Amino acid sequence: MAFGKKAQPPIRTLIGEGTVLQGEVKFAEGLRVDGEVRGDVIAEESASSVVVISENAKVHGRVKAAHVIINGEVHGPIESHALLELQPKARVVGDIRYEALEMHQGAQVDGELRPLKAGDRAAPASGLVLAASNDA
């Protein structure tokens, strides 16, 4: 697998500053949030989705996309299948699952950080330990 920099998908949707959106937001390709979302922000199943939560933005709900860039506030769990970028003014209250993580100085997280791959590997291993301990 090559680790070259891939082109990001275009940001086709914008939730503007001063806008408050209530309910689940589903999107394809790219989404930028400059306002407030009170609900989940979910990308369609795609290896190339991106969501940007800007400095003045707030999300109260789950965030799920391949590439997640946060410089605002998120109150809810985050799942990033490619890269999670926590920029200097990021404030997250919730658990985070990620494939790769870039965290800048100043970013704050009140929750658990867990890589997706490590969580997937841990489940079978713990199952083997339990099976072995039952036989003893």
Image (cartoon, grey):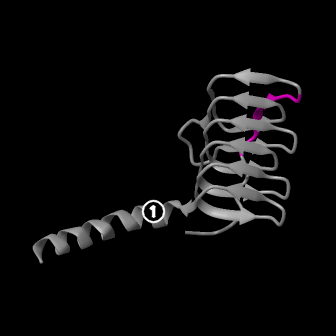
Q: Residue at x 11, y 73 (%)?
A: 135
What range of the chain is rendered magenta? 9-17
Q: Name the image quarter holding the N terminus.
A: bottom right
Classify mark 1: helix, strand or loop: helix
Observer-nearest residue: 5 or 75?
A: 75
Residue 119 picture location, percent across and down: 45, 62
Q: Is residue 28 above or below residue 130?
A: above
User: Which quadrant of the structure image shows residue 129?
Assistant: bottom left
Q: Name the image quarter holding the C terminus.
A: bottom left
**For the residue carrying disc 1, how many other residues have a C-alpha within 10 Å: few (<14), some (14-19), or many (20+)?**
few
Residue 113 picture location, percent across and down: 60, 61
Q: Is residue 112 left or right of residue 69?
A: left
Residue 112 picture location, percent across and down: 58, 59
For the image, the number of numbered tags is 1
Q: Residue at x 64, y 22 (%)?
A: 23
User: Which quadrant of the structure image shows residue 73?
Assistant: top right
Pointer 1: what residue?
119
Q: Residue at x 77, y 50 (%)?
A: 91
Is 87 in the magenta? no
Residue extending furthest left?
135
Q: Is residue 122 above or below residue 45?
A: below
Q: Is residue 66 left or right of residue 107?
A: left
Observer-nearest residue: 85 or 38?
A: 38
> Which amino acid, by three-letter code, is at mark 1?
Gly
Observer-nearest residue: 4 or 45?
A: 45
Residue 2 picture location, percent across and down: 60, 69
User: Which quadrant of the structure image shows residue 21?
Assistant: top right
